[in-house]
Image: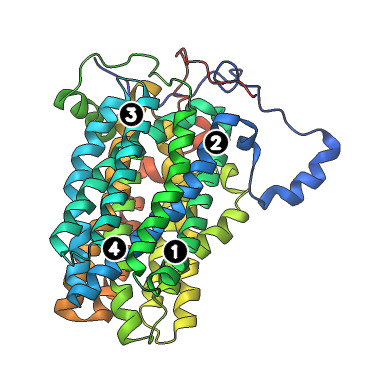
Amino acid sequence: MTMSTTPHPPPPDLPPKLPPGLPPVVPPPPKARTASGLRGFALDTRPLAYPVFRRLLIGQSAAYVGTMVTAVTIPVQVYSLSHSSLSVGLTGLAGLAPLVVFGLYGGVIADRFDRRVLYLASAFATWATTLALLIQAVAELRSIPVILVLVAVQAGAFAMSSAARGAIIPRVVPTPLVPAANTLYFTAGNVGQVAGPLVAGLLISLPNGYSWAYAADAVLFSLLLYSALRLPPVMPTGSAIRTGGLRAVLDGLRFITAAPVLWMSFAVDIAAMTLAMPTALFPQAAETRFGGGVGLLYSAIAMGSVAAGLCSGWIGRVRRQGRALAVAVTVWAAAIALAGTVHHLFVAVVLLAAAGAADLVSAVYRETILQTYAPDAMRGRLQGVFTVVVAGGPRLGDLRAGAMASATGLGVAWTGSSLLCMFVVLAGALLVRPFWRYDVTVAQDPNHGETRAPATPPE
């Protein structure tokens, strides 16, 4: 099957395409516009009017907190066993191959079968892996290889669930509200990234702290399982693929490579995560530079993202989303580079928070470009690639940072690489003109000509 990948503007009188069963997005009355102007920078909560999305967000919000508790506990446990940042970086490498394989193949499954079933099954696998981490902590195995194996299993399950969830969101809210829905998701995720490390720091400090931390994740993640159970069937629409396997994966990759807007959005994210992601260095920095505060370091980026999310009403009104994405990533790298030069914990936290604010903006634009640019029949596969990039990039970044810190020291691994990221992103964005000039208002409506599956109407 051949697909057109060149965007064409829709007819000027064509209204935004909505899933059947969802009410249209109605502009505010004239008297409300002054007040809405004042609220224009506040978080857009309109997607919460749709019950399916609301349940997904609540379940995912609880899971974000638990996931971050585990995400902090694993490297801290590994560092306590090895006293090596390289070993911490290996936790990222352990999850890379499963992310690539299951992210890409999970996208194929999401474009062929019911996305609800895929989301539920992969979420259950993630939950079971958390229970296994709890068991190894209770049993005091003190085995880094066991932890790395469990990290790999969890990464594969996460990749498949992310491919399904990203393809579900545009089906349960109207297309004009997709940026707002993504902002809510990322804001909730960043609240989890603030709360999770703080909770982890508290629990780890207790006797048998690792056990308490993994147990907290298992309890919180159960809410996500409930939200997945309540999903309606979400079958792919349009020209759904008939067969799976490598050919379907290659079709998705060909779609991306033929669209500069898409592959460049992936490229800037890879640069940001591999060259300017310092999280693997936080345990070493907390111990050798700041005299503690590892929980604050892990929470700082998310603190800035939460603040940006609460003032994010303007994000959906930006037309030049490619340009905005490149600028946001550049700001991220600059703030990370500065944070690597300071020796006071408070200043480092402030700079990391500034980086987090830029990261929230870039994350919303990456996800929105992908979800609104691609047709529904291709969304699962493209979301799978997106998952590989977004989740795999930080793992490569952890490996890069750990290896560089061991070879060159903390400063070069943190700041020098971030400066390189700034140059790479700006140069690439300026050279790829379709990405730099991308205007969302004239991009192809990916749902034009498709028959979309009914979404659950408001209850």
Residue under the image location 20 percent in, 16 percent down: 243
Upstream in sequence: badge 3 or badge 2: 2
Residue under the image location 17 percent in, 74 percent down: 82
Task: Tell me if residue 310 can be seen.
Answer: yes
Give left or right: position of 442 versus 312: left
Q: For mark 3, does the 10 Å Cα neighbourhood hold few (<14), some (14 to 19), or many (20 or more) residues?
A: many
Q: Look at mark 4 in the image and give the residue it sits on.
A: 74
Evaluate if marks 4 and 2 touch, with contact meaning CB atoms under 8 Å apart: no
Quarter of the image that includes the C terminus: top right
Amino acid type, mark 3 = Leu
Which label number is shown at residue 331? 1
Quarter of the image that includes the N terminus: top left
Task: Tell me if residue 323 can be seen.
Answer: no
Upstream in sequence: badge 4 or badge 2: 2
Q: For mark 2, does the 10 Å Cα neighbourhood hold few (<14), some (14 to 19), or many (20 or more) residues?
A: some
Q: Would you identify the image quadrant in which residue 373 lies?
A: top left
Which label number is shown at residue 55? 2
Task: Give the number of the mark in front: 1 or 2.
Answer: 2
Task: Give the number of the mark in front: 4 or 1.
Answer: 4
Q: Position of residue 279 (x, y in %)?
A: 33, 67
Give left or right: position of 191 versus 201: right
CA gap, disc 3 and disc 1: 36 Å
Residue under the image location 28 percent in, 38 percent down: 385
Amino acid type, mark 1 = Val
Q: Look at mark 3 in the image and give the residue it sits on.
A: 118
Q: Position of residue 216 (x, y in %)?
A: 42, 56
**What SS does tag 4 mark?**
helix
Upstream in sequence: badge 4 or badge 1: 4
Which of these two is toward me, 333 or 186?
A: 186
